[in-house]
Amino acid sequence: MTRKFTGDRLLVATHNQGKLEEIAHLLEPYGVAVVGAAEMNLPEPEETETTFVGNARIKAHAAAKATGLPALSDDSGIEIDALDGAPGVYTADWAETPNGRDFVMAMTRAHDELEAKDAPHPRTARFCCTLVLAWPDGHDEVFPGVMEGEIVWPMRGDQGHGYDPIFQPKGYAQTFGEMDRWEKNRISHRADAFRKLVAGCFD
């Protein structure tokens, strides 16, 4: 049995304002007030695991322990089949530079590595999102979500973030980078994980 969420305040273990807005919007119908990690002055814990669920657990439990509130965190990334699932949990690391994150560099690297391998088309890939809802007593619930698609080149669109301009979701002609933000949020890997979270803990 999944544990139900019964409080009226939920800590979202992220410093990303866009992600916070997205989650607050999704939980609005349930009368849950959402508070972000930055608001609570929480540091970002070291993500030392090699799986999405492992890293999401680190973030959720650290936040729940520090604040005494139930905490929700997600870890997400893109897995490219021809690159043996890379960058995977290292999706953001591929974009790291001394001056902040450069996702054009990261997307170019993905393309270059596919070209170097002469990977056949379609170059299948998926965005993965694992949500972990943790309680201060150490209990947690895990909800994985995926969106299948393929890697395209050149980059298309300036919406979204991260690798969105090179990811074309299955069944669509546009990349995530060309889609309206709310349209993307309706079909994305995060939306898939959220539907499971809401069905498990909020409905």
Image (cartoon, helix red, strand yellow):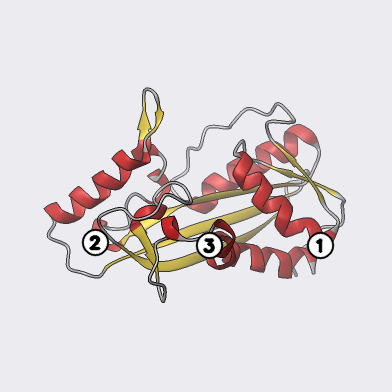
**In the depicted view, which residue is nearer to us: 9 or 137?**
9
The residue that label 2 is drawn on is: 82
Residue extending furthest toward the bottom: 171
Disc 2 is placed on an element classified as: helix
Kind of residue sitting beneath label 3: Lys
Give residue 187's quadrant in the image: bottom right
In the rendering, at what x and y percent does residue 19 appear? 61, 47
Q: Which numbered disc covers residue 189? A: none
Report the Cα–Cα distance between label 3 and label 2.
Answer: 25 Å
| Precedes in sequence: disc 3 or disc 1 | 1
The residue that label 3 is drawn on is: 184
**In the depicted view, which residue is nearer to us: 152 or 54?**
152
Q: Which numbered disc covers residue 29? A: 1
Residue 143 placement, left or right of 55:
right
**From the viewer's perspective, is residue 8 above or below residue 184?**
above
Residue pictured at 31% horizontal, 53% vertical = 155
Report the Cα–Cα distance between label 2 and label 1.
Answer: 41 Å
Mark 3 Cα-neighbour bin, 10 Å: few <14, some 14–19, many ≥20: many
Q: Are marks 2 and 1 in contact (CB under 8 Å)?
A: no
Mark 1 Cα-neighbour bin, 10 Å: few <14, some 14–19, many ≥20: few
Disc 3 is placed on an element classified as: helix
Kind of residue sitting beneath label 2: Ala
Mark 2 Cα-neighbour bin, 10 Å: few <14, some 14–19, many ≥20: some
Residue pictured at 79% horizontal, 64% vertical = 202
Marks 2, 1: nearer the viewer? 1
**From the viewer's perspective, is residue 142 above or below residue 8?**
below
Disc 1 is placed on an element classified as: helix
**In the depicted view, which residue is nearer to us: 99 or 177?**
177
| Precedes in sequence: disc 2 or disc 1 | 1
In the rendering, at what x and y percent does residue 85 appear? 32, 57
